[in-house]
Each structure stands twice: as C-alpha cells, then as structure tokens.
Image (cartoon, rainbow, N blue to C red):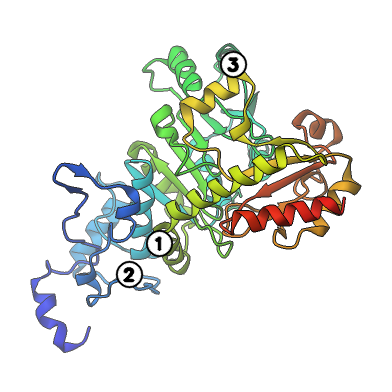
Amino acid sequence: MPDKNNDAEAVLPATTPRRNPKPEIDEIGGRKLKPSTLMMGHGFDPALSEGSLKPPIFATSTFVFPSAAAGKRHFEGITGKRPGGAEGLVYSRFNGPNQEILEDRLGVWEDAEDALSFSSGMSAIATLFLAMVKPGDTIVHSGPLYAATETLIARVLGKFGVHFLDFPAGASRAEIDAVLAKANSGRVALIYLESPANPTNALVDVEAVRASRDAIWGNSEEKPPIAIDNTFLGPLWQKPLQHGAEIVVYSLTKYAGGHSDLVAGGVLGTKKHMDVIRAMRNTIGTITDPNTAWMLLRSLETLELRMTRAGENAAKVCEFLRDHPKIERVGYLGFLKDDAQADIFRRHCTGAGSTFSLYVKGGEKESFAFLDALRIAKLAVSLGGTETLASHPAAMTHLSVSDSRKQALGITDNLVRISIGVEDADDLIADFDAALKKV
Ligand SMILES: *Cc1c(COP(=O)(O)O)cnc(C)c1O
C-alpha cells in the first residue's frame, strides 16, 4: 500500500489478513432490505480497498500473516483443532475476498445461514456428495436428475460402494414414504432432489419429502439432510430452504451468472452442513476463481431484473405458442393442469421460470426444420442467459440415454427445449412464428 495510506491503515485493527467490512446496513427503520438492494454493497467495505466503489479482483494465491502466532491460529481454525473455522484468509484454495463477498450475497437470496462458491455446478454437487457419503451408504434421489449428476451418483459413487434409490419427481407422499422406508434398512447419507426436473419440468413436493423424512428419522443423529438442485427456478421463484430443505445447490452458470459467459456453482444452507462441505472443498480445491466470482457479483446486481423480464417474456411467448396449429403441446409451468403438480407449484413457486418444453407436431425432421429456421434464438444447450436458446434434447443432451428411458422421461423426437432471454417479447414471437411457417 502506498505511503499516503498509512493513516487509513493506522485506524484498521492490527492487520491480520481478513476481510473486515464495516457494519452492514441491512435494515432501515425496521424494514429489512431486499436482496435486490443488498446486491450492490453487501459484504464489501470500500475503505478496505482504497475507496474503490467496486471490489477489485484479488489475484493472489496466498495471504500474508501479521505474525507467526496469527498464522498458527488460522491453521487451528482451518484444520478444526479450534472450533469456529478460519478467522481470516490463508490460501486461495480455501477462500479469497471476491469469493467471500459472492458467498455472502448468494446467501442473502434465500436467507441461508452460510453459502459456498464452486468452480462449476458439477464441482459443487461432487463436493457435496464426497463430503456426505461413505461406502455402504445410500443416496435417495428424485428422478430424473441433470444427466451428469445421475452419472456421478450411479457410476462414479457406485465404484466406491455407494448405493442409490430413486422416486419419480412427481411422487406422492405415500410413494416417497415407501422409498425412504426401503432405503432406511441401511444408512441413508443424503436425500437429493432436483425440481423442476430436466427436461420434464416435473416438480418435487419438498414439503412432503421433509414430512416423510422427519416421520421416519425424527430427531435421530442419523437423519439424512435434504439437498435440492434449485438451478431452474432459483433464487427468484423458488426458495426451498423455506419448504424443508437444508441444502440448496446451484449451477451459477445458468440464471445467476445469466450472460452465458462463465461456469460456476454454489451450495447454501444450514451452517452445520456448510462446515462439512467447506472442509471437503478446502481439501480438494473446487472453489471458484476470483475473476469468475467478480463476474458473478456483477451478475447478481441485475439478477432480479433479468429473471423478471425473462419470466414475463416466456409467459407471452408460451401464450402465443399454446394455440399455434403446428404445436402439439407446450410444457410450461404456467400452464400446469395436473392437480398434484399444480398444488406443488402453488405451495413452492412464485413464478413459472423461462425454460420450457415445446412439442412440435411431427418428429425430428419437423423439429430440426423449426430449429434451423430460428433467427433470433440461438441453437445451443444451456439456459438462463440473456439470450434465447433452443435445443433438441433427444439428439443433443440426452443422445446417449437409452430409448426406453427416453420414452419414460417423455424425451421424444418432437421435443424442443427453449430458454427465453431478455430480448423484446414481440421480436421473439415474430421469430418463432416465422420459423414455424418453415416447418
Ligand atoms: C447446468 C446444470 C448443472 C451443472 O452445472 P455446470 O455449471 O454446468 O457444472 C446441474 N444441474 C442443473 C439443473 C443444471 O441445469
């Protein structure tokens, strides 16, 4: 730090390397500030960074200790010799200022006790699993899951003697009870959910899973935590910690990042569980990098704006597509008819999202003709970006899935997946209208 800043330094506490933001303003006149307000400043004190309005990118692999004794104290916290964890920043595989600010802000959206950032959605999920399971354990999960998550559970963890049992995403309380009771003959390490499921959009009744879990395990030490992948509707339209989950998982690559220009993941929830997952992340180094964390801070400032606009656009586009003569059906959460699914939607969700399934009349030929004729929407897998994307699951993301499983999941040759962005809704409708004329 240059000499002119010596005065500022003098008023700081004897500088052990830790982020020490000024007291947070998260309430005014008894009014708790909303996440969209807190995203602009929460967790960052400009006075600690030369008055910089925005957090700098801290490109460093390690942090200087003010004394040998302070260094020892940090490591006592990191290794668990002393409770409470690390008191400051030690080494960049464990954490850094950009990641800590990101984690503070991620937690705000769901009122989580603690949050962790990761290098991808999959590294978040893998670190969660590695932290929770041991050989002989069972993971109970809803199905279908994101394809790589299914591979991780069945093939990778399977190699290490971890078992799994699943129930369909739309399962009733009685069906969930039956699967959990069956799994309870051994140690159940984790109940892992994904809702809405990809690509079926089926919703999981998180409240029913919680009630079923609690009825079986009560307050036993062996009670498995409930984790849920909230990538499709979170954090704006679904907050599963309020419905009984203890751990929420994100691919931040999607809506949270929101610009299709980064890959990252997040896990948030109860501190007790975050401590275990953090210890595993410290060991294997699956944390996000400072540059990506910084980009995510930018993204979170506009998260509510982007998701709100994308959601409104999707509602308009789906309304147009619903009655189109070349469309067989639109699988959009805003059009739920099935009573049980509509009931879960009312209890768990505050918006229908902007990712949906479109069944074109015909098969692969008609679907491909439609996809190739789109001019605004881009042909790419992924979702949640500012731009509208379209893809064909049967021929792309789910190409290697067996025919029988594809049939069970409703992944037909006429299924097109759409993720609506923040463009002008009428432009998008014009694009879809013109493309359907070419079918
Ligand atoms: C994309 C995605 C993932 C994996 O995230 P990456 O950031 O690509 O590793 C996991 N779950 C869901 C629901 C996803 O859409």
**Residue positioned 79% across, 50% down in the render:** 396
Indicate the secondary structure of the residue bearing disc 3: loop
Indicate the secondary structure of the residue bearing disc 2: loop
Looking at this view, is 321 or 245 the one in front?
Answer: 321
Kindly indicate whether the residue at mark 1 contacts the one at mark 2 (C-beta within 8 angstroms): yes
236 is higher (above) or lower (below) than 4? above
N-terminal label among 2 and 3: 2
Residue 136: horizontal and vertical position, in percent? 59, 28
Classed neighbour count for the residue bearing mark 1: other residues with Cα under 10 Å, few (<14), some (14–19), many (≥20): many
Q: Mark on residue 55?
A: 2
Q: Does the residue tagged 2 have its C-beta within 8 Å of any atom of ligand 1?
A: no
Amino acid type of disc 2? Pro
Residue tagged 3: 172
Amino acid type of disc 3? Ser
Amino acid type of disc 1? Leu
User: In the image, is 380 to the left or to the right of 10?
Assistant: right
Q: Is residue 127 visible?
A: no
Indicate the secondary structure of the residue bearing disc 1: helix
Residue 188: horizontal and vertical position, in percent? 53, 24
Residue tagged 1: 297
Looking at the rendered image, the quarter that the N terminus falls into is: bottom left
Q: Is residue 302 visible?
A: yes
Residue 293: horizontal and vertical position, in percent? 43, 63
39 is higher (above) or lower (below) than 64? above
407 is higher (above) or lower (below) than 37? above
**Residue positioned 51% across, 52% down in the render:** 309
User: In the image, is 433 to the left or to the right of 304?
Assistant: right
Looking at this view, is 33 or 192 the one in front?
Answer: 33
Q: CA distance from mark 2 to mark 3?
A: 47 Å
Q: Name which quarter of the figure residue 186 lies in.
A: top right
Q: CA distance from mark 2 to mark 1?
A: 9 Å
